[in-house]
Image: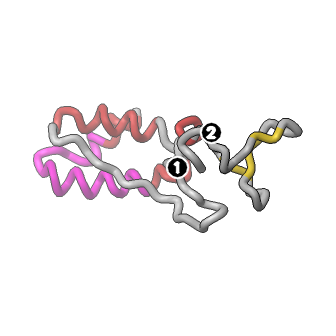
Amino acid sequence: MFERPTAEAPFSPADGLRYLGDGTPVCVHPEKVGLPPGRYKSKGAPLVVQLDLPSDPSQVATHLHGVFHGTAPALLDDLIVQATDQIRRAFPELDALSVLRQALG
């Protein structure tokens, strides 16, 4: 997966897709599928994403809403676990379950 089109993954007019030299299909617009750029198939990169919460507790639910609704479904469970842990550590005054409900709503 690349952040944008590249010569390393030329366009195939036959099917409208991009491929590496070994024939591995490549995504060049990861934001459209909600995944961070990575070589998941060709290099065996793990399918993970690192969550970073804002420093202002009043922005956490809004930030998480954008993250959750813009990510691939395969990453959602891990992001929820990360968010729960980070909220409890960084913002003990917040109820993590309530924040997650707001973010997912």
Give whichever of discs 2 and 1 has the lower sequence position: 2
SS under mark 2: loop
Q: Where are the magenta residues, as a range?
A: 78-99
- Residue, disc 1: 37
| Residue type for callout 1 | Pro
Check disc 1 and report its element: helix, strand or loop: loop
Q: Position of residue 74 (x, y in %)?
A: 55, 52
Q: Is residue 5 above or below residue 96?
A: above
Image quarter (top left, top right, bottom left or bottom right) of the C terminus:
top left
Residue type at mark 2: give it: Pro
Would residue 18 appear left or right of 36 to someone viewing this image?
A: right
Q: Is residue 36 magenta?
A: no
Foreground label between 2 and 1: 2
Badge 2: residue crowd in 10 Å (few <14, some 14–19, many ≥20): some
Provide the major secondary structure of the magenta segment: helix
Report the residue at 81% width, 41% height from top: 12
Q: Is residue 6 left or right of residue 102?
A: right
Return the residue nearer the eye: 103 or 5.
Answer: 5
Question: Badges 2 and 1: C-beta atoms under 8 Å apart?
Answer: no
Image coordinates of residue 62 in percent, x first then y, are 30, 32
At a point 72% along the width and 54% down the height, the residue shown is 20
- Quadrant of the rendered image containing residue 43: bottom right
Disc 1 crowd, CA 10 A, few/some/many (<14, 14-19, 20+) = some
Q: Which mark is residue 5?
A: 2
Q: Residue 60 got which mark?
A: none
Residue 56: x and y in percent read 15, 37
